[in-house]
Amino acid sequence: MSRLSFQKLQEDLKEVIASLPAESRLPSEPNLAKQMGVSRATLREAMRSFETEGLIRRQQGVGTFVVGEVPIIDTGLEVLESIEKIAGRIGLSVSTRSLEIEQLEADQDCARVLGIQVGESLTRISRVILTDDRPVAYLVDTIPSSLISRAELENELSSSVLDFLLQKGSINLVNSRTEIKAEVASSEVAHKLQIQRGDVLLNFSADLSDSSGKVIDHSYSYFLPGFFRFHVNRRVG
């Protein structure tokens, strides 16, 4: 199928989705593929972007459903804030699930980024953020255990890792260097976000540093594009 034909297929599918009320079930994959005159593989590929945008949701063994109006987390990137704080400011309810806190040893990459020795103890925190019970972000933070222990986090972590570090107060956080790129979802991330492997996500890779320049937290954040809108205000120079 040519690129123009594929774009036309996506436009036609978007019209079908838009014509149905929220929570309506789409025709089965074989029937919809027949209706559109394409193979099931082509249909599945065309539908991926709508799932990532939050327009539809797939329920294994049940079907594909139209989602209602999608809540958007719209924020600038000039100041580092947690998703919980941003959502609270715009009146959007978010929750956390699949919180995992584990102890591991630093490999060469982590040791280099965090300025520690290979084999030193690290604490890794991963969690899924939801809005309206829909997974929209998967966050992974890695911190030297000498700064924050697993036990401390298990007893006291109630919101984001960033907010936890700020409330702790003993570490003077100053800067976050963040690389932003589009990335296809691995099997692990796709499972966490209930999407298809290979779907495109926004990936933020960030190093959070203190006043001395030491990296305190090395993190990866995966966002569903349909639920987040990031922007930067830049002066003309």
Image (spheres, helix red, strand yellow):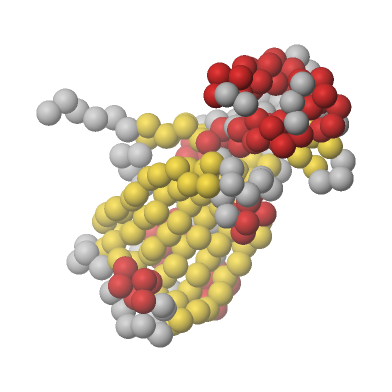
Q: Which residue is drawn at 66% across and 45% down?
A: 195
Which image quarter: residue 34?
top right
Residue 109, compared with residue 132, is above or below; it is below
The x, y position of residue 104, in whole percent, is 50, 79
**Residue 29 coordinates in the image, percent (x, y):** 81, 33
Q: Identify the image quadrant of residue 78.
A: top left
Image quadrant holding the C terminus, namely top left
Frontmost residue, 118 versus 149: 118
Q: In the visual, does 37 lie left or right of 130? A: right
- Residue 124 or residue 194, whichever sits in front: 194
Residue at (32%, 33%) from the top-left corner? 232
Q: Residue furthest front?
A: 1
Q: Is residue 164 visible in the rendered structure shown here?
A: no
User: Residue reaching furthest left?
Assistant: 237
Query: Residue 162 at x, y = what percent?
Result: 43, 57
From this view, report whether residue 82 is shown above or below residue 156.
above
Asked if residue 112 can be seen in this view, the reply is yes
Look at 48% across and 47% down and name the residue there: 183
Total number of numbered discs in the rendering: 0
From what the image shows, is residue 159 above or below residue 118?
A: above
Would you say 236 lies left or right of 179 here?
A: left
Which residue is drawn at the image coordinates 62% and 26% (left, top)?
1
Q: Position of 114 compared to 16: left or right?
A: left
Q: Which of 133 and 63 is in front in this view?
A: 63
User: Percent position (x, y) of residue 20?
Assistant: 78, 18
